[in-house]
Amino acid sequence: MPAHLFTNKVVAGLMYICLYFLLRMDNKSEEFYARLKEELAKSENWPAEYLFKFIVPSDPAKVLQIEETFNNMGAVIETTQSKTGKYTSVSINVRMGGAQQIIDKYIALSTIEGIISL
C-alpha cells in the first residue's frame, strides 16, 4: 500500500494486533515473537508506517534511551507526561521495513526497566 494511502484504520488495526499479543503473553518468549511476526507479516505490505507506543516511568534517561533506539530513522516521536508526572507516554511513528525489524525494536527496548509496550 502506498504511504499516502496509509490510514488511521490500518494503524489502529496493527496496534490492536500488537496489543492483543502483548497482553496475551506475560513472558515474551520466542513463541510470542514468532506469532507477532506472522500476524504483522499478514496484515501489511512492507515497508510501511508503524506506530510504537510505550509507557515508562518519568525518567529522562529512559525516555532518551527509547528516542535513541529510533535515531536516524526519520521517526516522529511524541512524549506526554501523565497527570501526576510519574509516567511518560512515548509514541513513535516510523517507517519500518518489515515485521522482523519491528520485533527487533521491541526486543531492544524490553531491557528498559519499567517499560510497558502497548
Image (spheres, grey):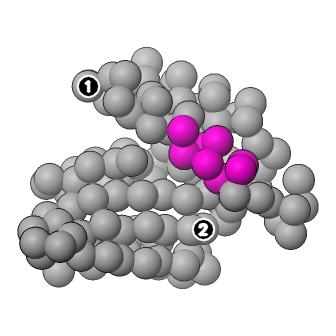
Q: Residue 20, percent across and down? A: 46, 30
Circle 2: element type: strand
Is 25 situated left or right of 14 in this image? left
Q: Which residues are magenta?
A: 9-16
Q: Is residue 67 visible?
A: yes
Query: Which residue appears at 48% of the width and 57% of the height?
Result: 52
Identified by mark 2, the residue type is: Val
Q: Could you say which disc has been placed on residue 103 in the image?
A: none
Query: Which residue appears at 21% of the width and 61% of the height?
Result: 56
Residue to which mark 1 is pinned: 26
- Front residue of this view, candidates 106 and 55: 55
Query: Which residue appears at 27% of the width and 59% of the height?
Result: 55
Identified by mark 1, the residue type is: Asp
Query: Which residue appears at 49% of the width and 68% of the height?
Result: 92
Is 12 situated left or right of 81 in this image? right
Q: Is residue 68 above or below residue 101?
A: below
Q: Could you say which disc has been placed on residue 94 in the image?
A: 2
- Front residue of this view, candidates 32 and 9: 9
Circle 1: element type: loop
Q: Is residue 58 visible?
A: no
- Front residue of this view, candidates 83 and 99: 83
Q: Is residue 105 above or below residue 67?
A: above
**Distance between mark 1 and mark 2 Cα atoms:** 26 Å
Closer to the chain start, of discs 1 and 2, is 1
Magenta stretch prevailing secondary structure: helix
